[in-house]
Amino acid sequence: MIKTTAEVRQAFLDFFATKQHQIVKSSSLVPGNDATLLFTNAGMVPFKDVFLGAETRSYTRATSAQRCVRGGKHNDLENVGYTARHHTFFEMLGNFSFGDYFKENAISYAWEFLTSVLGLPKEKLLVTIYESDEEAFLYWKDEIGIPVEKIIRIGDKSADKKFESDNFWSMGDTGPCGPCSEIFYDHGEHIWGGPPGSPEEDGDRFIEIWNIVFMQFNRQANGDMEPLPNPSIDTGMGLERISAIMQNVHSNYEIDLFQALIKDTANLLDCNDLNNKSLRVISDHIRSCCFLIVDGVVPSNEGRGYVLRRIIRRAIRHGHKLEAKDNFFHKLVKSLIEQMGDAYPELVQQQAIIEKLLRIEEEQFGRTLDRGMVLLEEILNNLEGDTICGDDVFKLYDTYGFPEI
Ligand code: GLY
């Protein structure tokens, strides 16, 4: 029986190994081959040059559980902890074909893994395809046997935005891309939401679990779609989402791995309410912070280091909301290692340095906040009227780490 997050990860890699895929270790969160990307944000990133034909490997089929960070955008960060599926850090399970198999095998492998290995009920699954992709449509219908009403066509967002579609995947403004087919899981009538493409699609009932990208183009900076040397396959399935399904829970934060982190955080901070959102924020953030440091990022005022600093500070602020009496964040490194150290031995190897960097950042942030309080007092004493000017508010936020409202 496959249930825990660790079991799902291993089952995925083992399954694709039986299909002659090379198991490739997760690459760094800092993309080595790509100046256009802040962080590795999908499983295909380490293979970008292989898709483009600029690099060859000793294998044409690969599978990985890739660590990913999608934490660059301000608004995304503020959502994390408050929704069922937003994270700064997650793991992406993927299988890749570099000019080897294409649509048919990719679709049948995904179906076999979900229904035979994981044993998901077929009637709970539905799929989307890019509007004009007849080949994928026929394969889902005739070979897999999905009823036509459960194969949903998704087109471009508008007539003048060619290839801007939920079913056309690109790694960024330039680079490998192509039409895709997504598999959705129906969490059941008791949860609000409609199927993809419907007005209620943003609800939580139908959740995308697997994206199969038919990589065919290299998007140029001017928007031209240059065909790739070989049509290829890139897939992505969020480990936390699929684990939630296997564990019969709805929110990613309810899976075994997060529940363990949440309990440890609650113990450390003496918090009795395990549903408190701040516990979720902190347990999400300890993952991205530890892995970013493992990959050589250090807190700073620009670029990747600035993103790391913002995530650390947000975690600390949520600790303060829970009335943390002391520096606490670095003490959670141990808990994370208990959960993920087997899959990522680099966490264990670097435990001491991660703890040290986080502790120093906590201490420094504490001093910065204290200085900010002095400035705030000064501002308030000199205030004419009842509004603090925008420049001062920005200074308190940007330089002294005061929280957004
Ligand atoms: N590269 C496919 C995905 O991230 O969904």
Image: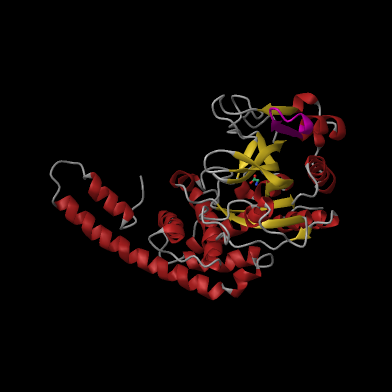
Residue nearest the observer in this picture, 2 or 391: 391
Figure coloring: secondary structure
Q: Answer left or right for 28 relative to 400.
A: right
Residue lying at 65% horizontally and 30% vertically, measured from the top left: 196
Residue 334 point in image, percent of width and height: 57, 69
Residue 173 point in image, percent of width and height: 54, 43
Residue lying at 36% horizontally and 63% vertically, measured from the top left: 365
Q: Answer left or right for 389 relative to 197.
A: left
Residue 326 is at least partly visible in this image: no
Q: What stretch is highlighted in magenta?
A: 125-136
Residue lying at 50% horizontally and 71% vertically, measured from the top left: 355
Residue 16 point in image, percent of width and height: 80, 54
Q: Answer left or right for 404 relative to 242.
A: left
Image quarter hosting the C terminus = top left
Residue 194: quarter of image = top right
Residue 200 is at least partly visible in this image: yes
Assess whether residue 347 is covered by the magenta stretch: no
Q: Answer left or right for 33 relative to 248.
A: left
Residue 251 point in image, percent of width and height: 62, 44
In the displayed structure, would residue 374 be above or below residue 70?
Answer: below
Residue 291: quarter of image = bottom right
Residue lying at 78% horizontally and 59% vertically, measured from the top left: 59
In the displayed structure, would residue 296 be above or below residue 391?
Answer: below
